Image: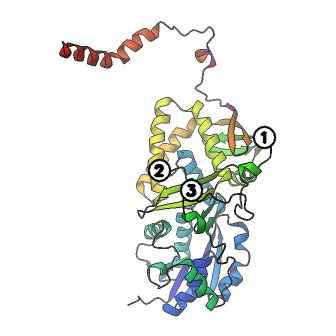
């Protein structure tokens, strides 16, 4: 028995899943459907969205510009942590909590009694959406059509849409599952489901944010990034918002074939999944930040922070953004960034990022100490250090020698 629902707020993208969910909700729940699209940088995907939502049965559509908050409160804290999930830069993962949070706010304002998402029962996004909804509206009814309807594949979804004259931007031959925002673009499905198939990087229309390295210019591109307390504040000497820096890096990084990732990752729900990601700007930003940290963080802090990055990535990937542990780890990360201020110069060339200089007023690097030339460093001090540092190894060897006798 389905729970009675009068008004439902739907996470709406205009893609295949959410396009057919509007008529499905009306047919199966008989409820009013309010569509909500969180603009996290989908670009042209938002064109004509309102007309499409209304034509397919929604009573209204909210398009909420979340881009700046997305960057400042989700992307940058994750980047400062150095969090990567199996090399994946979490583009889909940290976009879900902010969208879900805004959906809850609209649902409460509209007096809705349910929230619906189009995530499949095989994916990670169902967890991310629902954990965020539970954090902000613990009593809200959640509808997940993929866990209810008889549709079993994207081919059947297309047939369902065609039977109801729902316009689609895809067809059966180019039916990749994609997710796009200002940080990345993901590709899944079709030939990519076989890890033995090489992605068709040079096929027209496959890549959208990048070009393949072999199609990139033969001449390198130099860029400079400035950071203040771990936050990017300037690109090539021009001060600008972090969001605008990401857009600039997407352009220059994409043009130079930066940020392509082909990975078989371990999904939260237990299976392995193959995906191809385009993250040109994000890849550059992570790398430049890491280079700056090499001269600004002491050894113990840097090594411990690297351990924290693994846990931080798991938390974000698993949809646990709104948890005490994530907030505590962010507080730790912020404390490490107090001295991560300076400038990084990179050379971009055919998919490669090459260091071309790094400077910071808080640099812990001492050329005088590290130099092979004359310095005040007393090299005889190292003898005592090695004796103490190597004492456990020496004692173990001496005892082994005695036992052998």
Work out whether mark 2 precedes mark 1 in sequence or the reverse, and give the earlier one.
Answer: 1
Q: Which residue is disc 3 drawn over?
A: 74
Indicate which label's residue lies in the foreground, 3 or 1: 1
- Magenta highlight on residue 364: yes
- Give coordinates of residue 130: x percent, y percent: 46, 70
Say which residue label 2 marks.
312
The answer to whether residue 85 is above or below residue 48 is above
- x then y, percent, for residue 289: 61, 41
Residue 34 visible to an observer of this rendering: no
Residue 124 percent across, percent down from the top left: 48, 65
Whether residue 90 is in magenta: the answer is no
- Horizontal side, residue 311 vs residue 398: left or right: right
Contact flag, marks 2 and 3 (Cβ < 8 Å): no
Q: Secondary structure at mark 3?
A: helix
Question: Which numbered disc, 2 or 3, marks the residue that appears first in the sequence?
Answer: 3
Q: Real-space Cα distance between discs 2 and 1?
A: 34 Å
Numbered tag placed on residue 220 in the rendering: 1
Q: Residue at x 41, y 62 (%)?
A: 270
Q: Nearer the viewer, residue 262 or 148?
A: 262
Earlier-in-chain disc, 3 versus 1: 3
Could one spot residue 338 in this view of the protein?
A: yes
Q: Quadrant of residue 23?
A: bottom right
Query: What whole-number distance in Å separates the C-alpha atoms at marks 3 and 1?
Result: 31 Å
Pick the front one: 61 or 171: 171
- Residue 347: image quadrant is top right
* Other-residue count near label 2 (Cα within 10 Å), few / some / many at <14 / 14–19 / ≥20: many
Cα–Cα gap, marks 2 and 3: 12 Å
SS at circle 2:
helix
| Of marks 2 and 1, the one in the foreground | 1
Considering the image in quadrants, where does the C terminus appear?
top left
Q: Position of residue 30 (x, y in %)?
A: 51, 93
Q: Which residues are magenta?
A: 357-368
């Amino acid at each position: 028995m389905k729970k009675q629902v009068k008004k439902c707020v739907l996470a709406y993208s205009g893609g295949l899943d959410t396009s057919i969910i509007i008529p499905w909700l009306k047919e199966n729940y008989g409820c009013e459907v309010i569509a909500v699209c969180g603009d996290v940088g989908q670009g042209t995907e938002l064109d004509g969205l309102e007309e499409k939502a209304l034509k397919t049965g929604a009573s209204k559509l909210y398009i909420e510009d979340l881009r700046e908050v997305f960057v400042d409160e989700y992307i940058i804290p994750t980047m400062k942590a150095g969090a990567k999930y199996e090399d994946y830069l979490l583009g889909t993962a940290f976009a879900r909590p902010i969208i879900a949070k805004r959906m809850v706010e609209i649902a409460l304002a509209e007096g809705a009694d349910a929230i619906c998402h189009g995530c499949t029962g095989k994916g990670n996004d169902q967890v991310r959406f629902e954990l965020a909804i539970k954090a902000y509206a613990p009593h809200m009814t959640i509808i997940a059509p993929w866990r209810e309807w008889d549709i079993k594949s994207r081919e059947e979804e297309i047939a369902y849409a065609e039977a109801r004259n729902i316009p689609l931007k895809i067809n059966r031959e180019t039916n990749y599952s994609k997710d796009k925002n200002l940080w990345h673009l993901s590709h899944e499905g079709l030939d990519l489901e076989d890890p033995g198939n090489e992605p068709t990087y040079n096929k027209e229309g496959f890549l959208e944010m990048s070009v393949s390295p072999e199609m990139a210019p033969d001449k390198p591109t130099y860029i400079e990034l400035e950071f203040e307390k771990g936050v990017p504040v300037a690109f090539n000497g021009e001060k600008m918002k972090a969001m605008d820096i990401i857009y600039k890096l997407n352009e220059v990084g994409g043009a130079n074939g930066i940020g392509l990732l082909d990975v078989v990752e371990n999904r939260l729900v237990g299976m392995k999944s193959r995906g191809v990601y385009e993250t040109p700007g994000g890849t550059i930003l992570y790398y430049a930040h890491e280079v700056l940290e090499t001269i600004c963080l002491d050894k113990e802090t840097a090594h411990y922070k690297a351990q924290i990055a693994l846990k931080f990535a798991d938390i974000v990937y698993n949809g646990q953004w709104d948890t005490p542990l994530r907030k505590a780890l962010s507080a730790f990360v912020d404390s490490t960034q107090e001295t991560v201020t300076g400038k990084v110069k990179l050379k971009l060339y055919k998919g490669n990022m090459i260091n071309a200089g790094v400077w910071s007023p808080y640099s812990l690097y001492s050329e005088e100490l590290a130099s092979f030339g004359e310095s005040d460093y007393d090299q005889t001090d190292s003898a005592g250090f090695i004796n103490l540092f190597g004492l456990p190894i020496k004692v173990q060897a001496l005892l082994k020698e005695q036992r052998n006798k």
